[in-house]
Amino acid sequence: MDGPNAEKFCLSIRSQIAERIGPNRFRTWFGESAQFRVQDHALDVVVSNEFVGSWIAANYLDDLREVTRGVLGEEDVAVRVITGEPHVQPASREGDWPLAGASPTAPPLPRNGRPAPALRGRLGAFVVGPSNHLAYSAAADLAQSPGRAFRLLVIHGGCGLGKTHLLHGVCNGLAERHPTLAWRYVSGEEFTNEFVYAVKAGRVDLFRARFRHVDVLAIDDVHFLANKRATQEEFLHTFNAIDAGGKAVVLSSDQHPSRIATLSEPLVNRLLSGMIVEIEPPDVDMRREILRRRAASMPQPAPDEVLDLIAQRVTRNVRELEGALLKVAAVASLTREPLTLETVEKVLRHQFARETRRPEAADIVAAVAARLSVTREQIYSRSRDRTVSLARAIAMYLIRRHTLMSFPEIGRAIGHKNHSTVVMATQRIERMLHNGEMAAWRTPSGAHQTCLRGLIEALEHELIASPA
């Protein structure tokens, strides 16, 4: 099977598996590190961790096999989950030791020199616009002159907006511009797993040597450390050691550090001392440029009107945007039909419907906060002020009504509240609506009162009718 076709099939399988099992599960078990390879009617899924490989084989092998059959058009296909090719390419130092669960047959990293980077994201390929310019500039500065302007960079924002791309770009930039510097890239989950493994194996000293003797440490999804006190303490000491040596740390998180519940106060204070930048969803011009660049690497040309339609209708994040294009291209290729507006409408009709009906949780919070003259921070807080409590309850009710989020997920999104708090708030609003009660709140301009049902309907109209 030739290279372009194999790559196209891999992208299609990856996209369909993510849609089949859900983006959260796909990100957890496959994410950026898993490699998909198609050759001779067989799919190889290469992962760096034996535990992850065992879980994928036990839970998703049938899904992988069925999707591969559909993409390749073959009934007799083989699917193998292979462990032993780690996606992290750090500078080697004396005392390096295997990753937890890594295959003993995996080729060892050389002790001298740096292997070629295996991280996909590069700063030159990052589409820059108003929603991410500051984050990009900070990442580029760190890659160019690590530790010069700041020694801690925290990039936060929603899923699929480019945080991982920027961390990859920093590491690849360091490898290209400063080949003698030692850097290490891991996810928050990998940092936690390796620390737990080190404690159990009595090799904490080697773990510390592995993570503290670097010029730049990059940790993706640092919010994974929430609720893990021992790991938080170890990371804090790791950060202090790196910072004391004048080196740099770059982190990504799905929330601002001050909003990550159950992080220890010393760790939060340390994170707040750094350069904190937010990535927001791309505007339509950025989405169009992202699609144009992605389409340029595809074997089948995509007309401008097709790219424009997808850019206008898929607005949440870059991952969904690229996934939509890949899905349309894969269907057109497999059915041997041209890429037309009709094809896009047909293939993405369900996704377009979801985009129209379901605003993001952050959009709902922002709309409620603006309508009741409170801040988003107040809604996320534990304030019991009557106006803030009403705004928080309305936000929880609307998120439950207009998204697919569960009660625990809503609780985490609204300042890490307990799921029972979300249940009671939702029931309170439902009861008030059923009884036709009035909503009363106070702002700096005075007291306000209106029918709760009318307030809810006005907010829903604003959220659903608001342009991308």
Image (spheres, helix red, strand yellow):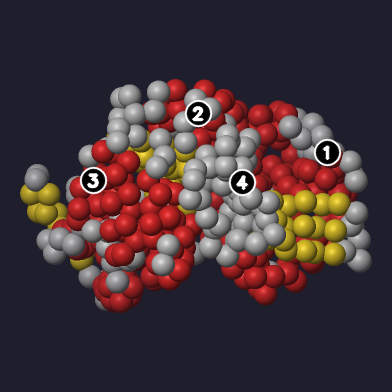
Q: Are marks 1 and 3 in contact (CB under 8 Å)?
A: no
Residue 240, percent across and down? 27, 45
Front disc: 1 or 3: 3
Q: What is the C-alpha distance between the residues marked 2 and 1?
A: 35 Å
Image position of 312 with respect to 108: above or below: above
Amino acid type of the residue that numbered disc 4 sits on in the rendered structure: Leu
What residue is pinned by disc 4? Answer: 109
Residue at x-position 37% and y-position 46%: 212
Q: What is the C-alpha distance between the residues marked 1 and 3?
A: 47 Å
Residue at x-position 69% and y-position 70%: 57
Q: What is the C-alpha distance between the residues marked 1 and 4?
A: 30 Å
Q: What is the C-alpha distance between the residues marked 3 and 4?
A: 33 Å
Q: What is the C-alpha distance between the residues marked 3 and 2?
A: 28 Å
What residue is pinned by disc 1? Answer: 4
Res 102 → quadrant: bottom right
Q: Please say whether residue 243 is visible from this viewpoint.
A: yes
Residue 398, percent across and down? 37, 61
Looking at the picture, tell me which residue is in the foreground, 458 or 353.
353
Q: Please say whether residue 371 is visible from this viewpoint.
A: no
| Sequence-first disc among 1 and 3 | 1
Image position of 57 with respect to 126: above or below: below
- The local secondary structure at tag 1 comes to helix
Res 361 → quadrant: bottom left
| Sequence-first disc among 2 and 1 | 1
In the picture, measured across the screen, residue 372 lies left or right of residue 159, that is left
What residue is pinned by disc 2? Answer: 180
| Sequence-first disc among 3 and 4 | 4
Looking at the picture, tell me which residue is in the foreground, 322 or 138.
138
Res 101 → quadrant: bottom right
